[in-house]
Amino acid sequence: MNRNDLANQHCQPRKGKENAIAPDQVQELLAQLPGWELANDGKAIVKDFRFDDFHRTLGFINAVGFMANREDHHPDLEAGYGHCQVLWSTHDVGGLSLNDFVCAARVEALLA
Ligand SMILES: C[C@H](O)[C@H](O)[C@H]1CNC2=NC(N)=NC(=O)C2=N1
């Protein structure tokens, strides 16, 4: 599945370990998402986005937040004047589900 295919999907209710993504598929999906890396012992994916000023950073946060609420899948965000780190993990799975990669691709699409 490439980045476009991912970004065109919607999140689905995914609960339980059976919805966790196997490590080899994690690597395949990560390869479609430049700049995204594993975090938290492979239970999350993360990327730090840089902006020229706080207005642009806040605009990004609002766009990500709007998308996240529509998808009912929510990131951890850490922001400063000119950056925002976005971390996706599926609490209901206790690690990575396809929802995390769909949302990472949707974040990339916001900036494309
Ligand atoms: C009921 C509701 O759909 C769930 O609690 C959703 C909400 N947003 C979520 N966000 C994230 N990141 N992981 C989840 O497991 C999750 N679950």
Image: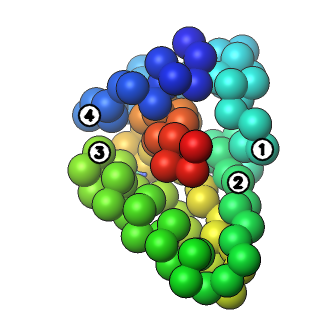
Instruction: In the rendered structure, find residue 13 and report the number of the disc placed on it.
Output: 4
Q: Residue at x 61, y 85 (%)?
A: 54
Q: Residue 63 vs residue 42: left or right?
A: left
Of the 4 image quadrants, the one containing the N terminus is top right
Q: How is the image coloured?
A: rainbow
Q: Mark 2 or mark 1, which is nearer the start of the sequence?
A: 1
Mark 4 lies within 8 Å of ligand 1 (Cβ measured): yes
Question: Which residue corresponds to the image point at 68% horizontal and 52% vertical from the top-left?
Answer: 46
**Viewer-nearest residue: 8 or 97:** 8
Mark 4: secondary structure:
loop
Across and down, in percent, residue 94 comes to 49, 43
Q: In the rendered structure, find residue 47 and report the number of the disc placed on it.
A: 2
In this rendering, does residue 41 appear at all? no
Q: Does residue 58 appear anywhere in the picture?
A: yes
- Measure how far apart labels 2 and 4 are at the Cα level: 24 Å
Marks 4/1: CA–CA distance = 26 Å
Separation of marks 1 and 3 at Cα, in angstroms:
22 Å
Q: Nearer the viewer, mark 4 or mark 3?
A: 3
Q: Point out which mark residue 35 bears.
A: 1
Q: Which numbered circle lies on residue 71? A: 3
Whole-angstrom CA distance, mark 3 to mark 2, is: 19 Å
